[in-house]
């Protein structure tokens, strides 16, 4: 029940923050195509989907790849908060709590809540580092799509993606490279925590024992090794 209550709180806060964002978007005349192009918004929407999925679908009915989806969502939202604090927040905003609710929720509170959920609630299956590397596909695709859109209509969601802010495309090497490196390290840290926190359940242990028992022993004799000619 504490885990269920925790995840309900995450869903409600994330949904309220995004609903507030949409209200502000409609009031300000901001284009929906710009609002939903922010990585922060996309990561928070993914958190809502993953948390709601865990609340509504029993663990036994989730697909085998679900733990990787959960891990990727955790990495994305945690890194969203980190990139905001290091690159995007104004100096007086980094430690201030006087910022608006949506900003605080999506960049601070929700990343912490999701990170603690990942830390305290083990995965159903062991996370493999090789498969965890696939979590980088989405940030790379986001990067490519953001640049492609910028070439079409001149709008970039973040300053570190805008060549006009850095004296041309060559100037993006350092800021964009820093963000990608942070994502790579962060993703493997999240995957590592998930792997360390994994605990085999009783049912998993029974299945593993059954599989080991079903394997033929390398020292066993063939069926006809002792038969008479």
Image: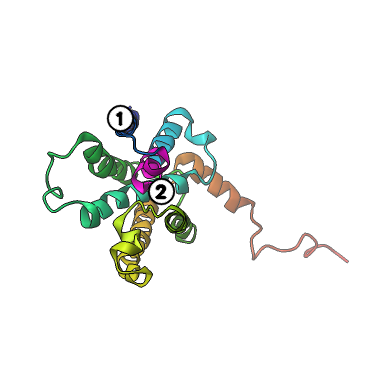
Residue at the image position 26 percent from the left and 44 percent from the top: 107
The foreground one among 37 and 47 is 37
> How would you rate the neighbour count of disc 2 (Cα within 10 Å): few for under 14, some for 14-19, many for 20 or more?
many
Q: Secondary structure at mark 2?
A: helix
Quadrant for residue 147, please give it. bottom left
Mark in front: 2 vs 1: 1
Q: Quadrant of the C terminus?
A: bottom right
57, above or below 142, in the image: above
Q: Which mark is residue 62?
A: none
Magenta segment: does it hold 42? yes
Q: Position of residue 141 (x, y in %)?
A: 47, 56
182 or 167: nearer the eye?
167
Q: How busy is the neighbourhood of tag 1: few (under 14 within 10 Å), some, or many (20 plus)?
A: few
Q: Which residue is mark 1?
A: 27
Can residue 128 be seen by looking at this rendering? no
Residue, disc 2: 71
Task: Look at the image and give the residue range highlighted in magenta.
Answer: 32-45
Whether residue 43 is in magenta: the answer is yes
- Identify the mark nearer the N-term, 2 or 1: 1
**Label 1 residue SS:** helix
Q: CA distance from mark 2 to mark 1?
A: 35 Å
**Observer-nearest of 220 and 89:** 89
């Amino acid at each position: 029940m504490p885990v269920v209550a925790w995840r309900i709180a995450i869903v409600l806060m994330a949904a309220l923050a995004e609903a507030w964002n949409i209200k502000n978007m409609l009031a300000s005349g901001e284009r929906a195509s710009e609002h939903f192009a922010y990585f922060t918004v996309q990561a928070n929407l993914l958190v809502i989907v993953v948390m709601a999925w865990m609340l509504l679908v029993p663990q036994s009915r989730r697909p085998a790849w679900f733990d990787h989806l959960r891990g990727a969502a955790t990495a994305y939202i945690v890194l969203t908060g980190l990139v905001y604090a290091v690159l995007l927040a104004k100096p007086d905003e980094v430690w201030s709590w006087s910022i608006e609710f949506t900003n605080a929720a999506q960049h601070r509170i929700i990343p912490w809540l999701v990170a603690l959920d990942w830390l305290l609630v083990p995965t159903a299956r062991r996370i493999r580092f090789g498969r965890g590397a696939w979590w980088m596909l989405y940030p790379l695709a986001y990067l490519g799509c953001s640049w492609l859109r910028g070439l079409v209509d001149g709008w970039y969601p973040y300053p570190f993606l805008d060549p006009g802010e850095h004296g041309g495309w060559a100037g993006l090497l350092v800021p964009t490279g820093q963000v990608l490196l942070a994502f790579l390290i962060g993703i493997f840290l999240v995957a590592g925590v998930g792997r360390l926190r994994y605990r085999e359940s009783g049912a998993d242990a029974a299945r593993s024992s059954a599989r080991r028992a079903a394997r033929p022993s390398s020292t066993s004799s063939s069926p006809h090794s002792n038969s008479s000619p």
